[in-house]
């Protein structure tokens, strides 16, 4: 099993465990249609099998309905091999009850990467879980894969965000 597969498997187990635990009790108010989010994140970035580094960044989103949202993510990874900046734009689809303490989602969309001053278009796809801590605060574990234009290369990113909801 290669490194990316191990990270994806381990992160999926953690996300699914949190998902199962989160649906067990009473919940704070969920994000509502018309609300925005702001997040800071820290994670692990894996490119190919032997290339792992810390990544961090900011995310901002808007929930247009109880099931649909959009977000922009700006991240950075400073590595021994290259410096990389990522900008991802994603559509999100939420699953489960809005009244639950946690809500799973899938996301996908186009993006851009600057890797050592080489600009490339990207495509990202991922899965995550919004875990409500209060009416306005949440944790978000997620995993995303990113594919690069004109390349067979892809990366895998697992992160944990602390987010804040504002608006409705």
Image: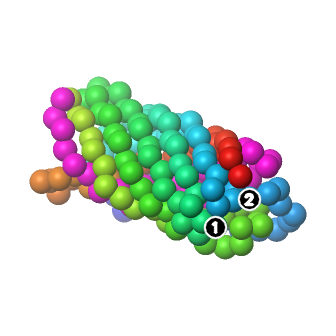
Q: Identify the secondary structure beneath mark 1.
A: loop
Which residue is drawn at the image coordinates 64% and 42% (left, top)? 163
Which residue corresponds to mark 2? 30
Which is nearer the eye, 35 or 9?
A: 35
Query: CA separation, marks 1 and 2?
Result: 9 Å
Q: Is residue 138 magenta?
A: yes
**Would residue 128 be found to the left or right of residue 66 on screen?**
left
Which is nearer the eye, 113 or 158?
A: 113
Residue 53 visible in rendering = yes
**Would residue 157 be found to the left or right of residue 97 on screen?**
left
Judging from the image, the colouring scheme is rainbow
Which residue corresponds to mark 1? 66
Which residue is drawn at the image coordinates 48% and 51% (left, top)? 71
Q: Is residue 44 magenta?
A: no
Q: Nearer the viewer, mark 1 or mark 2?
A: 1
Residue 92 to residue 159: above or below: below
| Secondary structure mainly formed by the magenta segment | strand
Occupied quadrant, residue 2: bottom left
């Amino acid at each position: 099993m290669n490194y990316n597969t191990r990270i994806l498997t381990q992160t999926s187990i953690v996300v699914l465990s949190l998902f199962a635990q989160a649906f067990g009790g009473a919940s704070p108010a969920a994000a509502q249609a018309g609300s925005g989010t702001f997040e800071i994140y820290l994670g692990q970035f894996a490119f190919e099998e032997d290339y792992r580094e810390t990544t961090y960044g900011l995310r901002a989103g808007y929930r247009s309905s109880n099931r649909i949202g959009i977000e922009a993510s700006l991240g950075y990874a400073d590595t021994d091999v290259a410096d990389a900046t990522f900008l991802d734009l994603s559509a999100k689809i939420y699953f489960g009850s809005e009244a639950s303490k946690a809500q799973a989602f899938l996301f996908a969309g186009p993006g851009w990467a600057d890797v050592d001053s080489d600009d490339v278009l990207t495509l990202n796809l991922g899965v995550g879980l919004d875990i409500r801590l209060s009416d306005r605060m949440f944790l978000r574990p997620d995993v995303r894969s990113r594919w690069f234009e004109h390349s067979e290369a892809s990366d895998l990113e697992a992160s944990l965000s602390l987010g804040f909801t504002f608006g409705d």
